[in-house]
Amino acid sequence: MPGLKDLAARYGDQGLVLIGVHTANGGERMASFVQEQGIDYPVAIDRAGKPTVSAFAVDSFPDYYLVDRAGKVRVADLPNSALEATVRALLAEPAPAALPAELEEASERAVRKDKRIMVLLGTDEDRAAFNKVSRLDRALRREISNEYETVPAPLGGSLAMALGVTATEPTAVALGARGEPLGSIAMGGLDRERVWSFVREHKVASADAEAILSGALAQATKEKKRVLVHLGAPW
Amino acid sequence: MDRDYVTIKIDVERNPNGDAVAKRLRGERRGGIPWMVILDADGEELVSSDAPTGNIGCPVQPEEVAWFAEMIRRSAIRLQAPDVSGLRAELEKYATSFRR
């Protein structure tokens, strides 16, 4: 603990944010312990059933998980001896560019619905040609609608520049929910198969429903619980 | 909820086999989506969101919140009546802002 306090103090002004997570077991004593030790970073207590421990596959205590400036878990299960050097390496990376204003609303929806963003750079006619490909394929149209928040934008505009697209031909750009670039494809001359391929390549990977259910039933057996199934749909 | 329930969400369109699992769990019952069902660890249905008046969907109205609490009451293992009342009060508070 003194080592972590020292780490937080030395690297805090460079952007290090430390969050402690204590297991539910003994959690009732955590508040007084934090006070006694003068710990000034937030310390959370895992819930019963150890969902945080399970989610991070923690196999020893303490265990360290490092999240980079873009919010990605970059290092898991880090030994104590490598902690400071890894923190320094991640802090040395540049902060991600701010989300372009044109993507803010789409990003908010994409994060909330666990979707991706597709920016269609070109003219209205270019986009109409792109949409025409999916108009004849109901499943493709639905796939795009289910998996992507689409954003129209002109070529050569501020969004295209922000995305680093300098091409002069109409381009579809797939982005993560927070605007991170995933891939792009020229929209001109696309056929249905290539659009399907692009859409599938960059969509959020969804787990098989049978596997989700069987996993939940196995957990319920082990922990003597019920399974609450929520059936939903994108619409 | 975590004390008694493993909670999962299945999207009937986005999760592969979502539609098949939905049909198997729900059978011929209709009433829109969202729909919920509570299963025991063997996969047997204990209670669903089909109240006597129909599927409560996302529980917002007082009678929907009441049925959700009833679902918990009927299926809970460790949760006791005060816990169910507490859950109902929390849901009631949350749902109020969505009421017209």
Image (cartoon, rainbow, N blue to C red):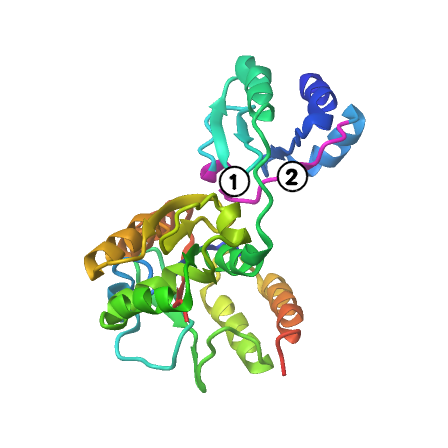
Chain letter belonging to callout 1 = A
Instruction: In this rendered view, identify the residue nearer to me: B75 or B62.
Output: B62
Instruction: In this rendered view, identify the residue nearer to me: A9 or A94.
Output: A94
SS label for mark 1:
helix
Q: Which residue is mark 2?
A: A44
SS label for mark 2:
strand
Give the side of residue A131 with respect to residue B94, left or right.
left
Instruction: In this rendered view, identify the residue nearer to me: B42 or A153.
Output: A153
In the image, residue A83 above or below residue A230: above
Instruction: Bin the neighbour count of mark 1 within 10 Å (Cα to Cα): few under 14, some 14-19, many 20 and up.
Output: some
Residue B60, image x and y in percent? 57, 76
- Marks 1 and 2 sit apart, C-alpha to C-alpha, by 10 Å
Give the side of residue A173 with respect to residue A17, left or right.
left
Q: Could you tell me if residue A142 is visible in this image? A: no
User: Magenta stretch: residue B37 in it?
Assistant: no
Q: Could you tell me if residue B75 is visible in this image? A: yes
At 30% across and 60% down in the image, what residue appears? B43
Residue A84, image x and y in percent? 60, 17
The disc at residue A52 is 1
The disc at residue B9 is none
